[in-house]
């Protein structure tokens, strides 16, 4: 029988997930399907209740449903840590959930800069929103002991310290020049630099030569932050790398095979994104 999964969001048209999972289904010769489902907030609980009846073994969740999905399912430790779920699967009638943005971020760093976590214990993260949560949770999981968290709304960075503990050091934009000098990793988890958003204005000349730079933004694929990092010869991971790596676990849960992120797949989606830039 054809195994079926989907991405649920509102809107969902922009999602690259059908193409991304479709690539693996075809390449691995799996009798499966991955669709996009545009569901309003009002319709979302009913949609989840009828997931099996609709022929689905599970789904990805995108905005605005990640918190609702968390509340309506049995979350694992990562989903609990982030307070949001983006991947759901049916397990003998139980609707379970996880947050694969954590491994998407970590997986993109492992691929771009193997051993990055052995070379540093200190990171600078810009942004204390939803993406920032997954990133901070992943860094703590990997043993990073000092995370300088810079956020426009300072209070939100403080809340992260309450939630995630003393490895979080709330900081302000003015502190960045000094903080960058000691950091082995710099992550942009804000929307700054995204198409249609204000630019991320940051001088990274103070970063050490071995530092790694990651940006969650993927339109454009290469943000000015990443261009500056590449120019310096630093290792980088972009938002598309994260998107691809976060998809691995869901595919494995629904279709029973752990897929590999490939260069060909990256290029296929990159072409799509460049067309939208
Ligand atoms: P996401 O789920 O993508 O992380 P979010 O939860 O809305 O989205 O978080 C967006 C992040 O980008 C926040 O850290 C936000 O800062 P605030 O917490 O102060 O809102 C940051 N951000 C968005 N626009 C910004 C801007 N113009 N200047 C600085 N930071 C900005």
Image: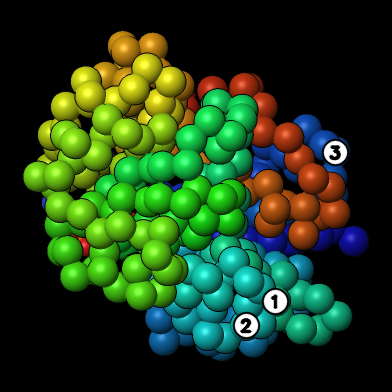
User: In this orientation, which residue lies closer to the viewer: 118 or 265?
Assistant: 118
Give the image location of residue 115, x and y in percent.
Answer: 61, 30
The mark found on residue 29 in the picture is: 3
Is residue 200 shown above or below 81?
above
Q: Earlier in the sequence, mark 1 or mark 2?
A: 2
Is residue 24 shown above or below 268?
below
**Residue labelled with disc 1:** 96
Snapshot quadrant of residue 244: top right
- Determine the residue positioned at 55% across, 26% down: 113
Q: Residues within 10 Å of mark 2 (few under 14, many from 20)?
A: some
Is residue 259 shown above or below 45?
above
Q: Secondary structure at mark 3?
A: loop
Snapshot quadrant of residue 169: bottom left
Query: Is residue 213 rendered to the left or right of residue 266?
Result: left
**Residue labelled with disc 2:** 73
Q: Secondary structure at mark 1?
A: strand
Quarter of the image with the C terminus is: top left
């Amino acid at each position: 029988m054809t195994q079926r999964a989907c991405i649920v969001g509102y809107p969902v048209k922009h999602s690259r997930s059908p193409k991304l999972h479709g690539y693996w289904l075809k390449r691995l010769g799996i009798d499966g399907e991955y669709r996009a489902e545009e569901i309003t907030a009002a319709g979302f609980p009913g949609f989840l209740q009828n997931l099996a009846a609709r022929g689905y073994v599970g789904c990805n969740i995108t905005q605005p449903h990640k918190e609702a999905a968390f509340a309506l399912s049995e979350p694992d430790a990562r989903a609990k840590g982030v307070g949001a779920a983006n991947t759901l699967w049916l397990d003998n009638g139980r609707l379970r959930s996880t947050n694969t943005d954590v491994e998407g971020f970590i997986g993109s760093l492992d691929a771009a800069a193997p051993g990055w976590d052995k070379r540093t214990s200190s990171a600078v993260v810009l942004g204390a929103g939803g993406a920032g949560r997954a990133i901070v949770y992943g860094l703590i999981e990997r043993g990073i002991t000092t995370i300088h968290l810079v956020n426009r709304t300072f209070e939100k960075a403080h809340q992260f310290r309450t939630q995630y503990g003393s490895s979080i050091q709330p900081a302000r934009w003015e502190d960045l020049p000094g903080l960058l000098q000691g950091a082995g990793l710099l992550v942009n988890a804000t929307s700054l630099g995204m198409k249609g958003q204000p630019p991320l204005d940051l001088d990274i000349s103070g970063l050490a030569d071995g530092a790694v730079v990651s940006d969650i933004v993927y339109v454009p694929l290469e943000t000015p932050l990443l261009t500056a990092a590449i120019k310096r010869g630093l290792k980088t991971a972009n938002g598309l790398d994260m998107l691809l790596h976060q998809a691995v676990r869901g595919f494995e849960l629904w279709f029973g095979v752990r897929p590999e992120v490939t260069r060909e797949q990256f290029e296929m989606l990159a072409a799509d994104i460049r067309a939208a830039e």
